[in-house]
Image (spheres, rainbow, N blue to C red):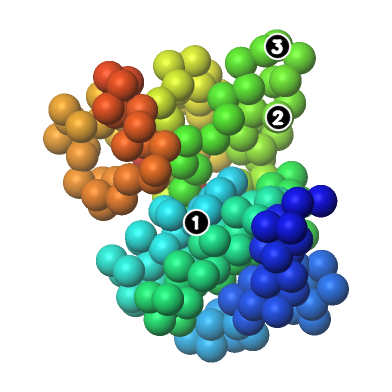
Amino acid sequence: MPRRKMMHYEYCDNAENIIQAGKPLYTEVKGKWNTAYFQNDNPLVVELACGKGEYTVGLAQKFPDKNFIGMDIKGDRIARGSRTAVEASLSNVAFLRAGIQYADEFFEKGEVDEIWLVHPDPQVRDRDEPKRLANPNFLKQYAYYLKAGGSFCLKTDSDFLYHYALEMISEDSQFKILDYTDDLYSSPLLEKHHGVKTHYEKIFVSKGYTIKFIECLRL
């Protein structure tokens, strides 16, 4: 394993704002995020497949009255997000190192107020449909831990994933699509992404890709 990756993993082992296997809260935090970790009653926002945590940290800076959790399986990515949050003195940020398919093991039914899915891998091949984070099985999971009246937002540069997600969500009785656009930066919905851009999103835009956005309500 490259030394740099090893350093990231060692950092994760010791970072107080990272919850992962081997740490006490990893098996105890379900249903207790506000009491056991954040120690307040603020709304809980989860970014799935958070990567380096750019969106998690960006939203946390804009909304200090909310609690934010970035979830990803990659320790080296989460380590970077953790460092950024620490450097910004953000006490309303945590990172959960685990696979998204196991999210219902860490969040109780109706515990989450808001879910963000930002530029996930579109998984365009037919055989990879089970990995698409907007497929019916994942939507069922989101509906479990997202409370009624909570929101689910998706940003993507992929036309394929955008149209696939619109179709899957429109067929799911537990969600209602509130707004959507295939060109966010030219849309009245622009303010709904709160001005937070990831590194790769900036690259996509500079190359002429349009950013798609979907906002849904958990019924």
Residue 126: assigned label? 3
Q: Residue furthest front?
A: 3
User: Label 1 is placed on what type of residue?
Assistant: Gly
Q: Quadrant of residue 132?
A: top right
Q: Residue at the spot x=45%, y=21% of the render?
A: 158
Which residue occupies 80% across, 81% down? 24
Instruction: Give the class, few, some or many, for how many residues have Cα within 10 Å of label 1's Cα (few <14, many ≥20).
Output: many
Q: Amino acid at mark 2?
A: Lys
What separation in Å lies between label 3 and label 2 (alpha carbons)? 10 Å
Q: Position of residue 192 (x, y in %)?
A: 26, 46
Image quarter of residue 188: top left
74 shown above or below 68: above
Q: Secondary structure at mark 2?
A: helix
| Disc 1 secondary structure class | loop
The numbered dot on residue 144 is none
Residue that numbered label 2 is attached to: 131
Query: Is the residue marked by circle 2 packed among few (<14), some (14-19), or many (20+) residues within 10 Å?
Result: some
Residue 185 percent location from the top left of the image: 20, 32
Closer to us: mark 1 or mark 2?
1
Seen in the image, is 10 located left or right of residue 190?
right
Looking at this view, is 86 or 130 the one in front? 86
Q: Given this view, does label 3 or label 1 mark the residue nearer the observer?
A: 1
**Front one among 174 and 75:** 75
User: Going 68% across and 51% down the picture, which residue do you hit?
Assistant: 74
Q: Is residue 68 left or right of residue 121?
A: left
Q: Position of residue 103 (x, y in %)?
A: 70, 54
Residue 53, disc: 1
Image: 129 above or below 95: above
